[in-house]
Amino acid sequence: MAQSQVYQVVVLGAGGVGKSCLTAQFVQGVWIESYDPTIEDSYTKQIPIDGRQCMLEILDTAGTEQFSSSESTPASCRSIGPTPTQTYQPTDTTTPIGHGFLLVFSITSKNSFNELKALRDTIIQIKGTDQVPMVIVGNKCDLAEERAVSRAHAFAVSHSWNKTHYYETSARSRLNIDQVFTDLCRQMLQADAEQDRFMQAQEAVYGPLGGKSTSKRDLYGRHRRRRRRRDNGPRCVIL
């Protein structure tokens, strides 16, 4: 049996938008009726994507998430099975652990939608690129009579964010839950394929890159950050 590719998924958004309900529906197929503010929980689930097996390590964050700066996997994301593990205590010395991000808001709360921009900006700043696997999720679409954010507006904003994919979900009825995670997984697989092509092109010119302790994601990340600094840096004009 082929080994599963492991990806870390971080679920972000304001408190009370349904991040835990959305995650529990995807992983366990259950609806959580009562609201219990999450500190942080992690889950794992293996899913087939286009003939490949992907192991998702999902970090369900608190409403006011402070990013960790570690590219390594936290201890709480190493569990096997669809049950929450011990709370992950983020460090303050490194960057986000995630390979992909779900930015979740409630369609009944305009404030929760407005908070997504700061989350996205932080991810881009720390990752050093806007080419980050990401999906915008408008949850609680079953509460249509309480809608405060129109579908058209949410779609327009997500499209302006580098054409980020947008879904409306209902954790209560499980609407579009699987589609959200499948879409994000495909984006992460595509990002890996792009990294492979980059590494192959570099090795064709320069030979093997890095040592055993340097992953292709690290090398590709450095390349993207250097290119972003170059593109955004000051221009030298000779008069």
Image (tube, grey):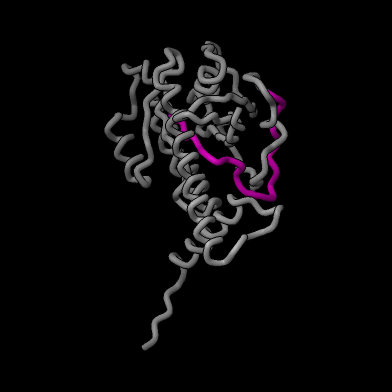
With respect to residue 124, does 8 lie above or below?
above
Can residue 58 be seen here? The reply is: no
Question: Closest to the observer: 82 or 119?
Answer: 82
| The N terminus sits in image quarter | top right
With respect to residue 100, does 208 lie above or below?
below
With respect to residue 207, does 70 lie above or below?
above
Question: Closest to the observer: 68 or 191?
Answer: 191
Question: Closest to the observer: 182 or 35?
Answer: 182
Residue shown at 42% from the left, 12% from the top: 173
Residue 164 position, x and y percent, is 38, 40
Drawn side of residue 75 relative to residue 190, left or right: right
Residue shown at 48% from the left, 63% from the top: 227
Can residue 85 be seen here? The reply is: yes
| The C terminus sits in image quarter | bottom left
Residue 115 position, x and y percent, is 46, 38
Q: Give the overall secondary structure of the magenta segment.
A: loop
Name the residue at the left extreme. Answer: 152
Is residue 95 shown in magenta?
yes
Residue shown at 64% from the left, 51% from the top: 215
User: Magenta span covers which residues?
Assistant: 85-105
Is residue 64 shown in magenta?
no
Question: Closest to the observer: 95 or 26?
Answer: 26
